[in-house]
Image (cartoon, helix red, strand yellow):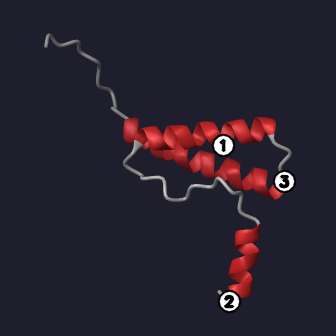
Amino acid sequence: MSNDETDAVDAGAAPDDNPDVDPGDIEARVDRVETIIERLETEDLSLADATRLRAEAEQLLAELDSSLDLGEGSVVERDT
């Protein structure tokens, strides 16, 4: 990709985008999803930006679902 193409892509990026969310950090992913929801609800975004944010949120939610999937297990309270 040329510098002009890179600049064009960067120009469309929202200032608080965080592509470096640590995939192992559940709290960071939840926080990012909440930030995306807030932006979608409160900001006047272009269709392209809203679509991009929605796709990012869907990806993060899928990762969270996979990380938190415990199968058919049950929660057992243990004495500490």
Residue type indicated by callout 2: Ser
Residue hosting label 3: 47
Alpha-carbon span between mark 1 and mark 2: 29 Å
Residue type indicated by callout 3: Leu
Left/right placement of residue 23 relative to residue 1 reads left
* Image location of residue 9, percent across then percent down: 72, 73
Alpha-carbon span between mark 3 and mark 2: 25 Å
User: What residue is shown at x 65% (from left), y 53% (from top)?
Assistant: 16
Residue hosting label 2: 2
Q: Nearer the viewer, mark 3 or mark 1?
A: 1
The disc, 1 or 2, on the residue closer to the chain's N-terminal end is: 2
Q: Secondary structure at mark 3?
A: helix
Residue hosting label 1: 36
Q: Residues within 10 Å of mark 2 (few under 14, many from 20)?
A: few
* Image location of residue 11, percent across then percent down: 76, 69
Quarter of the image for the C terminus: give it: top left
Residue type indicated by callout 1: Ile
Q: Nearer the viewer, residue 3 or 76?
A: 3
Left/right placement of residue 21 relative to residue 43 reads left
